[in-house]
Image (cartoon, rainbow, N blue to C red):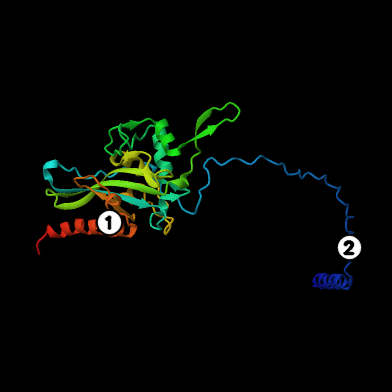
Amino acid sequence: MKRILSIAILVLLTTFAFAQKKPTKLAPKKAAPVVAAPPVADTVKAPVKTAKKKLKVPPKDGFYARKDIDSTEMVPLADVREEDVFYAKRIWREIDLRDTVNSVLKSPKSRLIDVLIAAIKKDELTAYSPIDSALNEDDAFLNPMSADSASKSALGTAEVSNNKTGTVTTVVNDFNPELFLKFRIKEDWIFDTKRSVFEPRIVGIAPLKYNEVSKQWQPVFWVYYPEAREILTKKRLINTNNDASSLSFDDFFIRRLFSSYIVKESNPGDNKIRDIITDPRERLYESERIKKSVLDYEQGLWEY
């Protein structure tokens, strides 16, 4: 019993001794000195100038891709047999480019005279002489002209005299498209009984140039229109009302978008209106009379 009591007293004393002991404080750790980093060398390289690469495809002149009519196929006209033609009337017209409607044919960007002469020089189109061997007007496409002859006829020639030597030299004038202000058209109005259609067919076209000697507009050469259609179909016409238009020169003639007046109709004497009527105003009245007579014939073909 005494032994148990002694052990209990010893345990109490030990516990009291530990309770009276103060906890020891830990000394704060010293912060490590901050060492400045060594300066870093500038490794950024200066920009290197490189040559600008050329575009493989040229930029578009506009905000959309315009349709190229150089690959346009010509729409052939319907074949007409001689036995199907019940009525035919040949008419000659003149187109004045000073008229607002026809001014598109003399646009600096695309002139009709430039198209014709360029095609003749490339031997893509045949020019025919406007006069025969007797120096009479001829539009029957019987005398083909060479490219040089057609160009000289269009440009005209002038005689230059040398006062020192006393010689006269013939030189070709410079090309001036502003001199070609009129075109003459030869066409046939036919009534096809097979298709029951009364329509005009353009046979030929000729640029006119004013002759200072005769004081008249005269053709410099004739072009067979069915042959010229292949070229005119691929040439864009400048439209003053719509830049997005894809009209060609052929469309301008086939759709009858031009303004013109009649200068001659087929007659036994092969006379022009100016050969019979001298007054310019009366000539226009006669031109309208012929135009009305052709249209009246068409109206008289039908019964209502």
Asked whether residue 55 appears in the rendered view, the answer is yes
**Residue lying at 42% horizontally and 55% vertically, measured from the top left:** 98
Q: Quadrant of the N terminus?
A: bottom right
Q: Residues within 10 Å of mark 2 (few under 14, many from 20)?
A: few
The front one of 253 and 298 is 298
**Marking on residue 86:** none
- Quadrant in the picture for residue 100: bottom left
The residue under label 2 is which amino acid type? Pro
Q: CA distance from mark 2 to mark 1?
A: 123 Å
Q: Write down the residue under mark 2.
A: 28
Front: mark 2 or 1? 1
The residue carrying pointer 1 sits among few (fewer than 14), some (14 to 19) or many (20 or more) residues within 10 Å by Cα, namely: some
* Left or right relative to 93: residue 37: right
- Residue at the extreme top: 165
Label located before the other in sequence (2 or 1): 2
Q: Position of residue 55 (x, y in %)?
A: 56, 42
Provide residue 143's location: percent of width, then percent of height: 30, 32
293 versus 142 height, above or below: below
Please tell me which residue is depicted at 31% across the width and 47% down the height of the picture: 185
Q: Residue tagged by mark 1?
A: 287
Pick the residue in front: 29 or 67: 67
Residue placed at 45% from the left, 38% from the top? 155
Answer yes or no: do the residues labelled 2 and 1 have beta carbons within 8 Å? no
From the top left corner, tell me how far across and down residue 127 is, in percent: 35, 35
Tell me the amino acid under the disc marked 1.
Ser
Residue positioned 38% across, 46% down in the render: 217
